[in-house]
Image (cartoon, grey):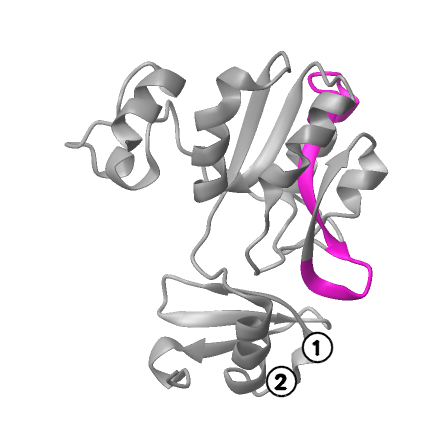
Amino acid sequence: DLAALERSTHGRRRDLDDDDELIFGVHQSLFNAKVVPSVPGAQWTGIVTSIACAMLSEGLVDAVVCVQSDPGDRFTPRPFVARTVEDIMAARGVKPVLSPNLDVLATVEALDVENLLFIGVGCQVRALRAIQPYLRVGKVYVVGTNCTDNGTRSGLDKFLRLAPSAPAEEIVGYEFMQDYRVHFKLMDGTYEKVPYFSLPAG
C-alpha cells in the first residue's frame, strides 16, 4: 500500500496531479547535482558516497547500511554495516545485482546503533519502512537510489557478454539512459553506448 507508506513516512501521499511527484514521489525540492571532482571509483560522480561519508563524519549517524562487493567478485553485492568512512568508500560503485540489504538489520541492532543511514533501492526502502517501527534504533535516514537494471548474477554475466562489444571484465558499471541507450562505463573512463533496440533478445 504505497499511499499508506507515503502518509506514514512523509505525512501525506504524493500529489497525483504533479508530474514530478507522480514520478519521483513526495518531495520538497528537486535538484540536478554532481560531485566535483568526482569520487574515484564511483559509478558516476559519487553523490551517494559523499552524502554517506559526510553524515557519518559529522555525527548525524553512527552506522550506514551500504553494499560492498564480494571479495571474489566485484559485481556480487555484500550488504554491510559501515562504521567508518573507509567502510563506506569500500562500497563505491553500483553492483547491478539483487542485494539482500535488509539482512544486516540484525547486525545494526546488535551493534546498538543509535542513528542509521540506509542506502537502498525502492523495494528495499519500502520493506525497511514497513518494519521501521520495530527496529531498535533512534533515527533512520534513507538515501534511495534508482533501480531499473537489477537482476541475478548469472543474468548480469549473460548481459555483459552479449550487449557491449567491450569485454565484460573492462566494464565498471552501466545505466539505461533517457537517450534510449545503455551507457557502459569502462575502466579507462570512456563509455560505450548501445541503443536499446540493439540489445540481444532473451
Q: Would residue 193 appear left or right of 47 to someone viewing this image?
A: left
Using the image as rendered, state which of residue 94 and residue 40 is in the foreground: 94
Looking at the rendered structure, the secondary structure element under dot 2 is: loop
Does 27 lie within the magenta span? no
Q: Which residues are magenta?
A: 54-76
> Of the residues shown, which amino acid type is indicated by label 2?
Ala
Which quarter shows the N terminus?
top left
The image shows residue 9 at horizontal and vertical percentages of 40, 19
The image shows residue 193 at horizontal and vertical percentages of 49, 76
Q: CA distance from mark 2 to mark 1?
A: 7 Å
Q: Would residue 81 appear left or right of 155 to someone viewing this image?
A: right
Task: Give the residue drawn at x 44%, y 27%.
Answer: 130
Is 20 placed above or below 4 here? below
Is 84 placed above or below 62 here? below
Task: Give the residue drawn at x 77%, y 34%.
Answer: 82
Is 185 placed above or below 150 here? below
Does 58 lie within the magenta span? yes
> Of the residues shown, which amino acid type is indicated by label 1?
Glu
The image shows residue 67 at horizontal and vertical percentages of 68, 46
Report the residue marked by disc 2.
Answer: 166
Using the image as rendered, state which of residue 180 and residue 101 is in the foreground: 101
Tell me where residue 23 sits by quadrant. top left
Q: Would residue 22 appear left or right of 106 to someone viewing this image?
A: left
Which quarter shows the C terminus?
bottom left
Using the image as rendered, state which of residue 132 and residue 85 is in the foreground: 132
Is 147 placed above or below 173 here? above
Tag 1: Cα neighbours inside 10 Å, few (<14), some, or many (≥20)? few
Residue 170: which numbered mark, if any? 1
Tag 2: Cα neighbours inside 10 Å, few (<14), some, or many (≥20)? some
Task: Give the residue drawn at x 43%, y 34%.
Answer: 126
